[in-house]
Amino acid sequence: MVFATQRGYGPWKDYWEWPGGKVEAGESPMQALHREIKEELDAEIRIDKFLHTVEWDYPDFHLTMHCYMCSLAGDALHLNEHEAAMWLSVGTLRTVGWLPADEILLPMIEEELGGRNPGKEDAPVA
């Protein structure tokens, strides 16, 4: 299963996304991911594998999103910024309304998790 969050603010409110966020000056994408997950979810993660870099043009900005397959390093998850979250199975990945850039990852995640019995420790984040 994979962990997804629902935006609770802004023009894309109620769309689903992979948790994560912007890389700040002086950070690597992986350092930013650790920081963002701590800020958004009060969680610690292990970054297991690079998945893909998404380049996407939204109407008011360009997004470069470095995506990784990650595992939770503990059981704690707390929604600090999102209105909802859920664990999705490979078969239910396409049942929520994804942000366009995040939706690009669905075939890759299905391939990554297909053919094995994924557990909730597999959580893609961006």
Image (spheres, grey):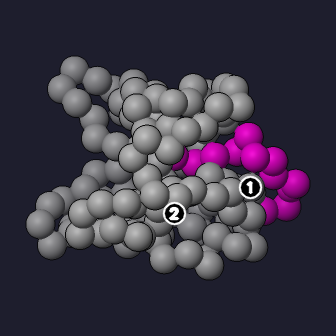
Horizontal side of residue 117 vs 78, given as left or right: right
Residue 21 position by quadrant? top left
Residue 71, given in percent of the width and then of the height, sits at 66, 35
- Rendered residue at 70%/45% (across/down): 122
Horizontal side of residue 118 vs 28, given as left or right: right
Residue 30, given in percent of the width and then of the height, sits at 43, 29
Q: Main secondary structure of the magenta part?
A: loop
Whether residue 18 can be seen here: yes
Q: Which mark is residue 116?
A: none
Label 2: element kind: loop
Residue 65, given in percent of the width and then of the height, sits at 35, 50
Horizontal side of residue 32 vs 94, given as left or right: left
- Rendered residue at 47%/48% (across/down): 19
Residue 40 position by quadrant? top left
Magenta residues, start to end: 114-126
Nearest to N terminus: mark 2 or mark 1 = 1
- Rendered residue at 52%/58% (across/down): 84
Residue 70, given in percent of the width and then of the height, sits at 61, 38
Whether residue 47 can be seen here: no
Above or below: residue 115 compared with residue 31 = below
Above or below: residue 26 compared with residue 33 = above
Q: Which mark is residue 1?
A: 1
- Residue 113 on the magenta span: no
The residue that disc 2 covers is 105
Q: Amino acid at mark 2?
A: Leu
Label 1: element kind: loop
